[in-house]
Image: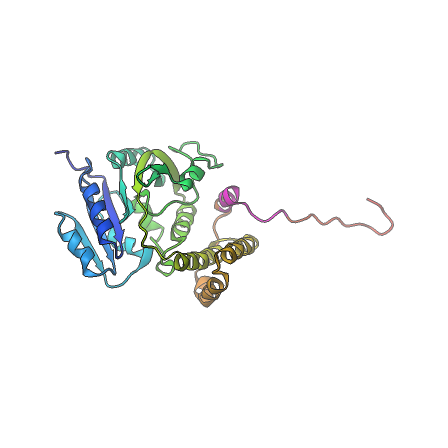
Amino acid sequence: MNAQDPRVSVVVLTHERPQELERTLQRLQALPERPALIVVNNGSAPAAAEVVRRFEGVTLVQCPRNLGAAGRNLGVARVRTPYVAFCDDDTWWEPGSLSRAAAVLDAHPRLAVLNARVLVGPENRVDPACECMAASPLDSRGLPGPRLVSFMAGAVVMRVQAFREAGSYEPRFFLGAEEVLLGQDLMAAGWDMAYVASVCTHHHPSPARDRRARALVTTRNRLWLAWLRLPWPLAWHETRKVWRDGVAQGVAGAALRAALAGLPWVLARRRVLPPPVVELIVQVHGGPPPARRRVHVTPGVQR
């Protein structure tokens, strides 16, 4: 039997998907790295806990209710290794990838987040989000792969110190764009994030998803994100873009009402990102067009 890699633990987030969880734990326990496994049962029925108890050595963290992405915070609180890999109950890490990720993080002490290549379904299709990451326009000198301004929450290996320093996942966001906020706060604290295609995770999406509810919460969170961290001109530009996306998804009005209901909290927590971080975000996602330069014309003088 291979020795356990002492550098990486895995936190698995699950909610009401015991069959998918069992498959994922089987895959994770078969990894050559033999990582410490921590399952966060996010307010699920007892079936999920029963699945975990069938796997020797797996730590169960039982949440009294569904905390969304913030459930991962409870899992990380149990981690005793320098790095933590995240996955959901419908994802698992490819053999050897966790050791490769740990070696990359060892070699790059300012790298907080390593986003893996995600292979979707039995066909092992590369997730389109990974193709976007691979094409990052940012200067990536000194990094092990393309520089990122965000990441995929269930497909990363993180430096535990950085995760805790940045404040972990914001509970109010529940699920949707929570990783964008954490990524921005990591960059503001001077940490780097990169896409490393040699590290792989598999995702077999569960059909048990409420797409409209997820779209509504994500749209609300994108509004909060703009108001929490961006300079006001860029925040207004982003608000209009999010509104258009929400209209296309049929959730704009409900999402805006939900976002405005949280406005006092947003304003109390508003902390604008440093200009260099804002510039990175604009390079990736774009921003408002430059303001037109006003030209003073003296009466009677043509220009």
How many numbered badges does the structure rendering display? 0
Q: Residue 173 at x, y = what percent? A: 38, 58
Q: Quadrant of the N terminus?
A: top left
Q: Based on the picture, tell me whether residue 285 belongs to the magenta stretch.
A: yes
Which residue is outermost to the right? Answer: 300
- Residue 165 shown left or right of residue 36 in the figure: right
Name the residue: 23% across, 39% down. 7
Residue 95 covered by magenta stretch: no
Q: Position of residue 89 (x, y in %)?
A: 26, 49
| Chain part drawn in magenta | 278-290
Q: Is residue 80 visible?
A: no
Placement of 26 over or under 245, stated as above or below: above
Residue 95 sits in quarter: top left
Classified by dominant secondary structure, the portion drawn in magenta counts as helix
Residue at x 65% of width, y 49% of height = 291
Q: Nearer the viewer, residue 82 or 194?
A: 194
Write the residue at 27% across / 56% down: 15
Quarter of the C terminus within the rendering: top right
